Amino acid sequence: MKDKKVLFISTEVMPYMPESDMSYMTFETAKMIHRKGIQTRIFMPRFGVVNERRHQLHEVIRLSGINLIIDDIDMPLIIKVASIPKERMQVYFIDNDDYFKRKAVFTDEDNKLFEDNDERTIFFTKGVIETVKKLNWAPDIIHLNGWMTSLIPLYLKEFFKDEALFKESKIVTSLYNDSFEGMINPELSKKIAFDNIPSKKIDLIKEPSFLNLQKLAVANSDFIIEGSEQLSDEIKAFVKEQKKPSLEYIPKDEYEKSYLDFYLNQIM
């Protein structure tokens, strides 16, 4: 198993973000896999609420410096890295001053969604994939956590479809109740279409609600995990319609055996 590689991409990871189903399960699953001798890499956004000094983040100059085109605008990519104490696991942070410097995650002081959450999501998507390409690190499994990773399966299958590094990668999406009210910027579809992704591939998110973003991720993934106990009936029904291998919700204190079996016997 030592030659196997798993890429974890998450909106939240402990200890850099507060404990939630997502931050806990991303950390614990990566730790479990890592201890089995499987190589791991973890990526998350460098939100302004992440304390760089406390967690000893530092910029990786050789990985930074790429400009990502978001809706015909060049946006500089900054890559920072930290090590999870005692685990010898590296976490890579996708950063950009315009998108991630603010001291908040997705909403302002009035609890309104940021107008540029659509662009932040595209930037995060492209930033992770371009950085993994630069590392020349071909993952056997790409495990996604959180709605901000919802575009990654689509981009891997369309925008990066000719990238040999990901040809054999299996995509796993864990679904959580990390919902938001309303929709992110409806211009999301237009900005994705700018990357020459066919409109029929993005029909699901003409209205970019939390539920529709989840559906997009499920439709383009190979395996599904229920990461939260409380998921909408609609997304559960959609998962069943897709007829993809899935793992139902497992409580935190019981997950290890089931997750290992799912990883080792169904995915790998």
Image: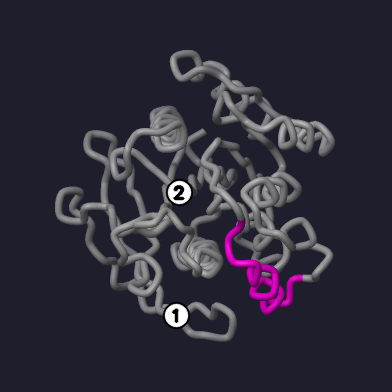
Q: x, y percentage for residue 254? A: 49, 13
Q: In the image as oriented, which residue stretches furthest toward the top?
A: 254
Q: Secondary structure at mark 2?
A: loop
Q: Is residue 241 left or right of residue 117?
A: right
15 left or right, relative to 119: left
**At x 48% / y 59%, what residue is drawn?**
113
Q: CA distance from mark 1 to mark 2?
A: 20 Å
Magenta-colored span: 183-197
- Vertical relation: 8 (above or below) 134: above
**Percent from the top left, x then y, of residue 230?**
58, 27
Residue positioned 38% across, 42% down in the render = 13
Q: Position of residue 97 (x, y in %)?
A: 33, 73
Count residues near mark 2 (Cα–Cα under 10 Å), then give few for <14, some for 14-19, many for 20+. Answer: many
Which part of the image, by quadrant, shows the C terminus? top right
Residue at mark 1 = 75
Amino acid carrying mark 2 in the image: Thr
Residue under the image location 42 percent in, 56 percent down: 107
In primary-sequence order, the first of circles 1 and 2 is 2
The front one of 216 and 143 is 216
Judged from this view, the residue extending furthest toward the front is 110
Question: In the drawing, does residue 200 fall left or right of residue 193?
Answer: right
Main secondary structure of the magenta stretch: loop
Q: Is residue 104 above or below residue 232?
A: below
Residue located beneath label 2 in the image: 11
Q: Quadrant of residue 106?
A: bottom left
Q: Is residue 246 magenta?
A: no
**Residue 1: x %, y % from top left:** 52, 33
How many numbered tags mark residues here?
2
Q: Amino acid at mark 1?
A: Met
Q: Secondary structure at mark 1?
A: strand
Which mark is on residue 138?
A: none
